[in-house]
Amino acid sequence: MSGFAGVVSLDGALPDTHLLERMAQTLAFRGPDGTHITTKPGAGFCFTFLRTGPAPQCPSQPCSLDGRVWLLGDVRLDGRNDLRRKLEQHGDAFDGDPTDEELILRACRRWREDSLPDLIGDYSFALWDAEARHLWCVRDLMGARPFFYAQARSNLYFSNTLNAIRCASDVSSALDDHFIGDFLLQEWCSDPHRTAFRNISRLPAGHLLRFSSKRLEVRRFASVPIDEPLWLKREEEYVEHFRALFDQAVTDRLPIGPVAIFMSGGLDSTSIAALAIESAKRNATLLGLRAYTIDYRPLFDDKEGELASLTAKHLGIPIMIMSGAQHIPFDRWGERDVPVPEPCNEPFRRLYVAQHREVAKHARVAMNGYGGDGILTGQAWPYLTDLMRYLRFARLGKDFGNYFLEKGRFPPLRGGFRSLLQRWTGSDSGPGYPEWLNESYENKLCLRRRWEELQSHPQKKHPWYPNAYHDMDCGPVSSVLESEDPIWTGAAVESRAPMFDLRFVRFLLRVPPVPLCIDKELLRRAVGNLLPEKICCRPKKPLLGDPLVAHQQKGSWTPPVTLSPPESLRSLVNWQKLMARLQERGVSSQSPELRPLSLLYWLRDIERRT
């Protein structure tokens, strides 16, 4: 992902070139292929370029069609040909193959804000109208590209890198209590506008920011669409359509040249690898595909390396297996070479960084299998109730009856009944409210009430896939995708998730869940002939062990009960209670007690750099 940052001054003041140079230095790790600093009356921009493809890219930004409206950002569009045809139908003429940046500039010039829903792909960008002194900032619908901003007096600072904004001396480094509170309660913040810093905001996915002399306004420009159900006569038709869209999503994300795939032994990432190879053969293009896998043997009997190797051999691609067992929890977590922009509850972060740095030696684009555990795992209960509501009893009998005849059991309802029963009977073994929070901090932010809000079920917007839809439209998906950003690894590697392609997602949201979207049946039928039978038939399984628990049992790591936290953390956490809890129970990867430890390391790192 290329890096960008800018400052706009509504009073027309000349930009601080020293600030822009510091911002550019902060962005340097993102773009090894060129750095550009540009100043204009009332605005300054810096850009570091990462060449990825496959579409033509604009290597120097900001760029413009008319010298008035300038684009600065990181853009990768899907459906390029469709957008180009639409522009040509309205009178635009192209000379050669346009860049994604040019397509956006043309679309916004012709349709202004109405063009935004037609822009699909991974992007975050700013448009500066130098004559009107008007700034637009836009983030894609899934949130694959981050965007941050801060207003200080008449200045607006923006970037896809949070630490670049922190270079501005008039932007406070004070922490956001509400963000930190959510982190301690559930390890991520549910408010998509907040960051860990009080005066720096995050532009949520699918949102537009407008900044001018009149006001600063943020609003949603689009949501994940809810289309009419797709009723086809034969199941094979769903499979064919699925395969075509999945293949398109993978093909559109393949660069020309080397590419990596984060590949486990499961079905999602292996399917993407198989389709990438098929695409390269069909289009007669070179594909330097290499797989990267983590295996935790001998900590426990981890099958991922073995199964991923089986797939790699079947596909004829090289694979690099990194040993997760050699990495100790919180080992060198706060090293200066890779600053953590926000609190991160990941004790094995060093392993994550090391893997990305190995990838960076081979490729600048890495594919991942995120998204397969959402819609494709399916919920039968919402579908069942929806069919009953509209009296579709024939369809209900056909779908559920055929599933029973084929599988010998009814499809898993996944209606949350087990959790509800456990709460009613008091047998819920899940993590409860953290009793180690500092009482004054707890009362100040009403954290018990906040905890109850976070435990409540979200509003059901989609009739068949309520949970998956919520996660994509306003839930944690954008946070997960943002965690793959190079700022978390320090490696110039752009992560791409074909299963979050909007065209692909919109189709899946229309497919009746039973039988094809239960336990990835649709995926198995679509790509099963490309993979080893052992992979295609493998049920979804969690990791067979907890590396954090395994290290404790082995004696290679113990919870740091003797650590002395800074005063800033003591004001949030009752450290004595927390240490007593750790000594009593130890800690697992799911333990709430892990969050204060992660926050401790992050705060120490922040204080060292301030």
Image (cartoon, helix red, strand yellow):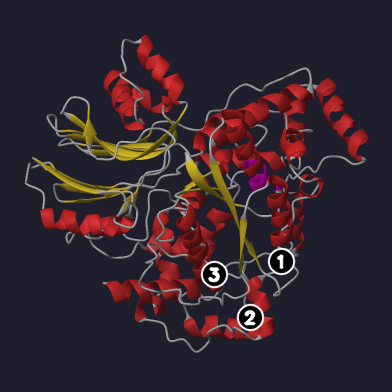
Foreground residue, 460 or 409? 409
Q: Is residue 198 magenta?
A: no
Considering the whole magenta stretch, tell me its main secondary structure: helix
> Eyeballing the image, is 568 above or below 319?
below
Residue 8 visible in this rendered orientation of the protein: no
Q: Which residue is mark 3?
A: 348
Crowding near the residue tagged with mark 1, few <14, some 14–19, many ≥20 C-alpha atoms within 10 Å: few
Q: Is residue 271 magenta?
A: yes
Badge number at residue 102: none
Q: Which residue is mark 2?
A: 586
Where residue 305 sits in the image (x, y, percent)? Answer: 69, 61
Where residue 125 sits in the image (x, y, percent)? Answer: 32, 39
Foreground residue, 3 or 98? 98
Q: Which residues are magenta?
A: 267-272
Left or right of 301 on screen, residue 595: left
> For the residues marked 2 and 1, what is the alpha-carbon distance in whole angstroms?
16 Å
Task: Tell me the SS state at disc 3.
Answer: loop
> Eyeballing the image, is 500 above or below 183?
above
> For the residues marked 2 and 3, what is the alpha-carbon distance in whole angstroms?
17 Å
Where residue 228 sits in the image (x, y, percent)? Answer: 62, 21
Q: Which residue is mark 1?
A: 429
